[in-house]
Image (tube, rainbow, N blue to C red):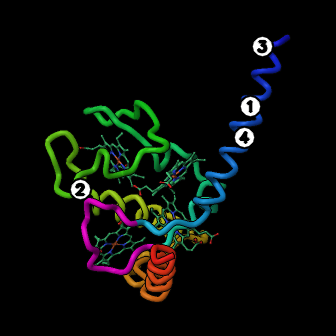
Amino acid sequence: MRNLKIMLAMAVFLAMGAALAWAQDDVMFLNSKPLGPHERPLVKFTHAKHSANIKCVTCHHNYDQYFNLVDDSEGMSCHECHKVAPTPKNKISLTTAFHKQCKSCHEQAASKGKPGGPVMCGECHERKSSDEFLAAQAKKAKK
Ligand code: HEC
Ligand code: HEC
Ligand code: HEC
Ligand code: HEC
């Protein structure tokens, strides 16, 4: 009985933590540190909206050397496995990983006549939202 109470308390605690984490990540500006200062404006990504209809493992995957899906990688950054330049262990560079994953799904949707996302550089690397985000961050850092 006591164990059950502890378990319930933990479940509530975990659910609250998850709710907080999700509130933060509804919309994110992708800014992989290993890419250094970005050439292009930062890309705004509606994580919550995307996760509503797409399985986590579709994006948060992990493959073995034969390209079998072996695990998910939720909570890991893409750059933990995809390096700035391709390596023997992982031939897909970080920028290619993002471009391939984001664009190919949007293209597939469009080719089926379904609503998809952007495929043009400036539609993802959007100057206005990126500048606004960076200005807001700079303001926060000053406080
Ligand atoms: C579907 C969205 C999407 C489209 C379309 C797209 N990109 Fe990207 N691009 C990304 C994402 C996401 C990243 C990774 C950003 C990060 O994590 O920092 C990225 C990274 C980059 C980077 C490395 C980071 C930097 O700014 O130096 C370059 C350069 C780049 N993209 C150029 C382009 C060019 C040129 C095009 C058009 C031919 C293009 N992208 C189209 C989403 C997109
Ligand atoms: C359409 C692709 C996509 C889907 C679906 C998706 N994610 Fe993500 N997720 C991302 C990307 C991209 C990032 C940023 C990774 C990076 O910057 O390296 C991310 C980041 C995260 C992070 C880290 C948050 C942070 O602030 O750094 C967590 C945790 C996460 N996702 C969990 C999930 C879970 C759980 C699901 C399923 C309910 C899910 N994701 C579905 C693409 C996706
Ligand atoms: C735990 C390690 C790991 C993480 C984290 C990871 N990947 Fe991968 N990914 C791999 C491996 C391994 C391959 C196969 C590489 C090869 O063929 O050399 C791969 C292949 C890919 C491919 C090409 C095949 C495909 O599925 O279309 C894309 C695109 C890709 N990853 C994008 C991403 C993005 C975007 C993220 C972050 C949301 C991410 N990966 C996170 C390990 C990872
Ligand atoms: C497996 C499919 C899939 C993947 C992977 C995916 N998207 Fe999307 N994306 C969609 C669909 C479907 C829509 C259209 C949603 C709608 O209009 O209801 C969309 C819409 C968008 C939009 C338009 C604004 C919005 O949020 O609705 C942007 C920007 C976008 N995606 C960026 C990205 C980026 C950046 C990545 C990679 C980190 C990515 N997407 C990965 C399917 C995907």
Task: Quote the CA–CA distance across marks 3 and 1.
Answer: 12 Å
What residue is shown with label 2?
Answer: 93
Q: Is residue 70 left or right of residue 26?
A: left
What residue is shown with label 3?
Answer: 3
Magenta part, dominant SS:
loop
Residue 36 belongs to magenta span: yes
Instruction: Determine crowd level at label 4: few under 14, some 14-19, many 20+ residues with C-alpha closer than 10 A.
Output: few
What residue is shown with label 4?
Answer: 15
Q: Quadrant of residue 138?
A: bottom left
Q: Amino acid at mark 1?
A: Ala
Q: Are marks 1 and 4 in contact (CB under 8 Å)?
A: yes
Q: Is residue 16 left or right of residue 131?
A: right
Q: Quadrant of residue 85?
A: bottom left
Q: Secondary structure at mark 2?
A: loop
Residue 9 belongs to magenta span: no
Q: How many marks?
A: 4
